Amino acid sequence: MRRLLLVFACSVSALAQSPQIDKVDPPNWWATMPAPMLLAKGQNLNDARFTLSDAALHIKKTVISDNGHYAQIWLTASPARMETIRLTARTSRGATTVAYTFAPRRNPSGGFSGFSSKDVMYLIMIDRFADGDPSNDGPDHDAQLAKSRGWHGGDLRGITQHLDYLQQLGITTVWITPVYQNHGNQSYHGYGATDMYAVDEHFGNLTDLRDLSAALHARHMKLVLDTVPNHVGPNHPWVRDSPDPTWFHGTLENHTLAQTDFAPLTNPHAPWRDQINVTQGWFANTLPDLNQEDPAVSRYLTQNAVWWTEQARLDGLRIDTFPYVGRAFWQSFHAQLHSLYPHLTTVGEVFNSDPTITSTFAGGVTRTGIDTGLDTPFDFPTYFALRDVFLKDAPMTRLADVLRLDNLYPHPERLVPFLGNHDTTRFLDGATSSNTLELAFTILTTMRGLPQIYSGDEIAMRGGADPDNRHDFPGGFGPTQDNAFNPAGRSPDQQKAFSLLQNLLALRSSHPALQTGTEQLLHADNNTIVYVRTLTTSTHGMQRTLVAVNKGSEAADVVIKTDKAEIQNAQRSTVLLGSPNSISINTGTLTVHLAANAAVISDLD
């Protein structure tokens, strides 16, 4: 009997020591795609030999973590057609096998189309927009609702259910914050990933994401997903058990704080000492900084972006904390994405007011190093200028000075200007005049580039710094009389702001010159700015749309010489916004009659 027990104990011990695979990243891949690096997570993988059931596929190399918890399996190719293979890990103690699928590539129709200055982008924080599926709110929903930084219940279905509202406003492109699993305290925002290949259960599931994408594309709208290659969340399993010690810059116990001054990265005379903590520090001193210089990390993050793009037929990616990652990674990242999705558009967060700094991160710029390949950065310089002009009484020349530096960008027409986002105070939080938002929206929707609207700004939402700038959208969370998704549920101020932006976006949509035309600045002084957007086509000839704004408390007549300007030879004007008699055209001059705190938009013939 004792001998039988000993044999049984030895058998159990051997079974416990046999290799085990619990998870593989990416969860699947696609036929004809570039060769993947599979990251297997499990137990007892030390000394494992990996094999594939398809003899035509080969493993280039395998890298196993010292504790046997992770194995990097680098394949030489993907199969030529769809198939499910068996991946086997074998050691002297036993073997384990998992199925792995290479799916067919998705049909490019209805997705992967990119965005451009013809579009209007709308930023949605998923958790704060609309609760379309209360079943995923979690068992502690009431307690979370009471917290300003808790999970409030917004999800992917909630967005899908309100696409009529967005389309009625005039939105063509929806940017949603990250969908990654975020198992951490106050991680409703999505930027603290604990699994980069899972949709957080609070947001729904992968099917919900695909349904949102399909619903948008059915309306000829577009989907942009937030991606975060810079860092993961502090509760990510890698933080205490990484696939390799080189996967992070620093450790939980010993790391540096991320430096927010990007100037040294653009200064050819700056020592590495002054640059290192931009790309190697931990953001907010809490978010573990990934080491993209490690080839495995670089491959993992690039594959991750490809995986989400293919799964959801994304049209674009918004890239978080862009300057905090080295340029060499961005170049290879974009080379891979653009080779697979030629029309996919990427827009990067470069939170800085100086165009000489912001422009260095745009694709095509090599004056401070390697070309990042980024399609465009967000237009933070005009964000700061517009706020200075309308909220701090800076002269209109402040905006003109920023626009003067557009020649620093290879494609200034791709820039994405905005009045605010989820990381800034609400625009109206600093406004003193009821017309301030109207004037700012007028410039935002008529200037060069693609305007971005932060959810709630269109209904005049107010709020200070985080978390005050991230209140729930009224009407998205259960029955309420204050349902801003419907006109009957809006207050007079909400309806006024909504109608204003709706009219401006309709005007923009019906006037191609406001979408893709060149921009010529005709006049700027303390209170007024005048510019013209011009587009010449073979079918419609020259189209010219004049925009004039007066933020002053008194009326102003702005006289502009027309000689050798885009408004030369203009004979008549058709006012689209403002008083019908706002424009006077004489020989050699054009006069704009601006009321106090008012704007004029006019076609010129």
Image: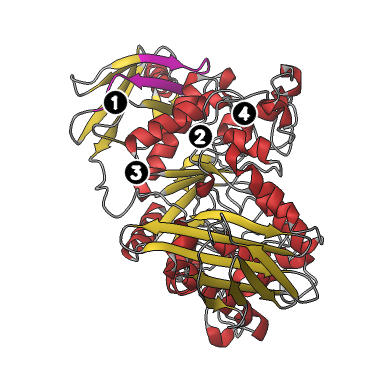
Q: CA distance from mark 2 to mark 4?
A: 36 Å
- Closer mark to the observer between disc 3 and disc 1: 3
- Closer mark to the observer between disc 4 and disc 3: 3
Q: CA distance from mark 2 to mark 1?
A: 39 Å
Comparing 520 with 138, the one in front is 520
Sort mark 3 into few (<14), some (14-19) or many (20+) by Cα contacts within 10 Å: many
| Residue under pointer 4 | 240
Q: CA distance from mark 2 to mark 3?
A: 23 Å
Callout 2: helix, strand or loop? loop
Residue 156 seen in render: no
Amino acid of disc 3? Glu
Amino acid of disc 4? Arg
| Residue under pointer 1 | 87
Amino acid of disc 2? Gly
Q: Is residue 594 left or right of residue 112?
A: right
As drawn, the residue found furthest toward the front would be 587
Callout 4: helix, strand or loop? loop
| Residue under pointer 2 | 363
Amino acid of disc 1? Leu
Q: Are marks 2 and 3 in contact (CB under 8 Å)?
A: no
As drawn, the residue found furthest toward the bottom would be 488
Please report the residue visible at 35 percent of the width from the left and 66 percent of the height from the top: 219
Q: Are marks 3 and 1 in contact (CB under 8 Å)?
A: no
Please report the residue visible at 73 percent of the width from the left and 68 percent of the height from the top: 428
Quarter of image, res 40: top left
Which stretch appears magenta?
61-78
- Labelled disc at residue 567: none
